[in-house]
Amino acid sequence: MNIDWAALGSVFGVSLVATVALVGLFTLGIVGLSKSAAPAEGATEATGTGSAAVARAGAYVCFALCLGAVSYGIYMIVA
């Protein structure tokens, strides 16, 4: 039995990078959704509603990229 260590290392490297990228994208999506939360209890009015809309749109883009990456991975496994 012969182990191709270079191939094993490249698979490990690609899976590590893909995992960190997906977790990072998902985290950015969660942070983007938290930016559009209701104002704090002591606040009198919501400020920066434009930036909240941009943050929510960015969060949806991050979630869509995560969904695309997972769908592509499932496609690669099945095909």
Image (cartoon, rainbow, N blue to C red):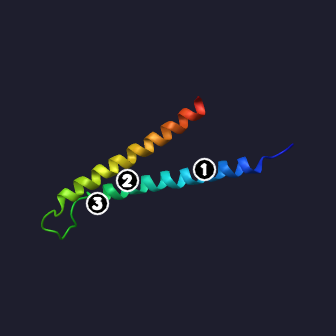
Residue for badge 3: 35
The residue drawn where x is 28% and y is 55% is 55
The residue drawn where x is 22% and y is 67% is 40
Q: Position of residue 32 (x, y in %)?
A: 32, 56
Q: Position of residue 23 (x, y in %)?
A: 48, 54
The residue drawn where x is 59% and y is 28% is 79
Rounded to the nearest angstrom, the CA distance separating label 3 from label 2 is: 10 Å
Picture quarter containing residue 42?
bottom left
- Secondary structure, mark 3, is helix
Question: Quick one: label 1 or label 2, which is nearer the N terminus?
Answer: 1
Q: Seen in the image, is 13 located left or right of residue 5?
A: left
- Secondary structure, mark 1, is helix
**Label for residue 76?**
none
The extreme right residue here reads: 1
Q: Position of residue 31 (x, y in %)?
A: 36, 59
- Number of numbered labels in the structure image: 3
Q: Label 3 is placed on what type of residue?
A: Lys
Q: Seen in the image, is 49 located left or right of residue 8?
A: left
Crowding at dot 1, Cα within 10 Å, few <14 / some 14-19 / many 20+, comes out as few
**Do the CB atoms of the residues marked 1 and 2 lie less than 8 Å apart?**
no
Rounded to the nearest angstrom, the CA distance separating label 1 from label 3 is: 32 Å
Residue for badge 1: 14
Rounded to the nearest angstrom, the CA distance separating label 1 from label 2 is: 22 Å
Question: Quick one: label 1 or label 3, which is nearer the N terminus?
Answer: 1
Crowding at dot 3, Cα within 10 Å, few <14 / some 14-19 / many 20+, comes out as some
Residue for badge 2: 29
Disc 1 versus disc 2: nearer the observer:
1
Disc 1 versus disc 3: nearer the observer:
1
